[in-house]
Image: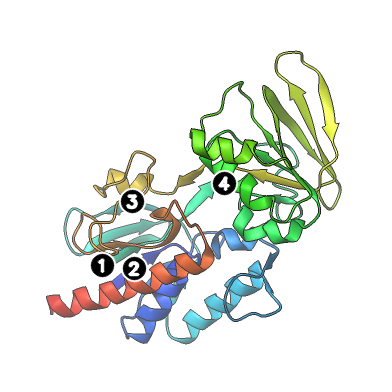
């Protein structure tokens, strides 16, 4: 069997692409991975996705999306894609259960936030630990929070968070920032933003929610506990693109898929959607929007071929 399109990725981008492809009667196959739903499965309350005036839990939102695409006929496999072959059409998509053929492929594998790997970092995700200020900043109104990082992303996170938080402390392990001068100056000019240099985070403290963090000065070796209620990692993201770049898909220096025309990649018949391309917005709604675009581009591409 040759599918009209195979979608790789089970987050908002992949599921929205599947929704539009299904309603166009393309009968898509979607590989959702071993943990369907993407990063929103790790998020507690989602208040910035349209249509939910009182907010919705991240896992509930994703399960609703999954039910919706299944209702319209999307075939979902909860397994990982291990390799792809884009050297000829039909394309080959290889998973643990076999090799699948498709006329088109939509890459929607997303990007993972980079973490420090601390003992309680993952345990408290969604309970005071976050990697997205624009997603979660609202929940930290009048609270003390820290931002980990030294680049533009850290400055942007801090400047956004200070709209809600009582205070923001930027923690950086070096004595100089990588951030651009204008972004650094903007943070330095805000009296509610402070800085801890040559400092690394040792652990995140708290039973059910973040109650503080333990830090260590790299010069003196002195350790101290900061009484904060929020922890934001801003040390970059890693797009899930390695197997696609090996297969000839063009990626930029940071590993994000390069778009040639709307959602088309450099390989004819291979499209992209969501955070695997978008390193700027990284929102569920923007990922979903790009998933819609990719499916419409696939539909048009197949119609032109026929």
Question: Counting residues from the N terminus, which is met first, the one under dot 1 or under dot 4?
Answer: 1
Element class at badge 4 = helix
Q: Assess whether mark 2 and mark 4 are in contact (beta carbons under 8 angstroms).
A: no
Residue 281 located left or right of residue 269: right
The residue at which mark 3 appears reads as 257
Quadrant assignment for the N terminus: bottom left
Find residue 197 and report its horizontal and vertical position in percent: 67, 25
Please tell me in which quadrant of the rendered image residue 294 appears: bottom left
| Circle 2 or circle 3, nearest the eye | 3
Name the image quarter holding residue 119: top right
Could you give the CA–CA distance between mark 3 and mark 1, rounded to whole angstroms?
16 Å
**Are discs 3 and 1 less than 8 Å apart at CB?**
no
Q: Which residue is mark 2?
A: 6
CB under 8 Å between discs 2 and 1: yes
Q: Residue at x 82, y 52 (%)?
A: 209
Coordinates of residue 234 in the picture (x, y in percent): 59, 42
Q: Residue at x 50, y 57 (%)?
A: 282
Q: Which residue is mark 1?
A: 104
Residue at 60 percent across and 62 percent down: it is: 40
Position of the C terminus, as image quadrant, is bottom left
Label 3: few (<14), some (14–19) or many (≥20) C-alpha neighbours in 10 Å = many
Q: Where does residue 231 sit, x and y in percent of width and height?
A: 72, 45
Asked if marks 2 and 3 touch (Cβ < 8 Å), the reply is no
Answer with left or right where residue 274 lies relative to residue 198.
left
The residue identified by callout 4 is: 156
């Amino acid at each position: 069997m040759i599918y009209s399109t195979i979608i790789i990725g089970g987050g908002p981008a992949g599921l929205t692409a599947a929704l539009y492809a299904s309603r166009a009667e393309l009968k898509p196959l979607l590989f959702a991975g071993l943990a369907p739903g993407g990063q929103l499965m790790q998020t507690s309350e989602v208040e910035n996705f349209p249509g939910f005036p009182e907010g919705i839990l991240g896992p509930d939102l994703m399960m609703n999306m999954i039910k919706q695409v299944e209702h319209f006929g999307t075939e979902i496999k909860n397994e990982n894609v291990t390799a792809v072959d884009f050297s000829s059409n039909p394309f080959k998509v290889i998973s643990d259960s076999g090799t699948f053929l498709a006329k088109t492929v939509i890459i929607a594998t997303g990007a993972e936030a980079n973490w420090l790997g601390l003992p309680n970092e993952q345990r408290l995700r969604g309970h005071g630990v976050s990697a997205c200020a624009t997603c979660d900043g609202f929940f930290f109104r009048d609270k003390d929070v820290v931002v980990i990082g030294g680049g533009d992303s850290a400055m942007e996170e801090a400047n956004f968070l200070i709209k809600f938080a009582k205070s923001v402390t930027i923690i950086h392990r070096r004595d100089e920032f990588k951030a651009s001068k204008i972004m650094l100056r903007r943070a330095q000019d805000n009296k509610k933003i402070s800085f801890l240099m040559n400092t690394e985070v040792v652990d995140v403290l708290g039973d059910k929610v973040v109650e503080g963090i333990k830090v260590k000065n790299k010069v003196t070796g002195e350790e101290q506990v900061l009484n904060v209620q929020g922890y934001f990692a801003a040390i970059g993201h890693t797009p899930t693109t390695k197997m696609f770049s090996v297969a000839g898909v063009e990626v930029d220096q940071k590993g994000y898929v390069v778009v040639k025309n709307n959602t088309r990649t450099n390989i004819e018949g291979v499209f992209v959607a969501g955070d695997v391309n978008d390193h700027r917005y990284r929102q569920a709604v923007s990922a979903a929007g790009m998933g819609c675009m990719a499916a419409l581009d696939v539909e048009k591409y197949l119609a032109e071929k026929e």
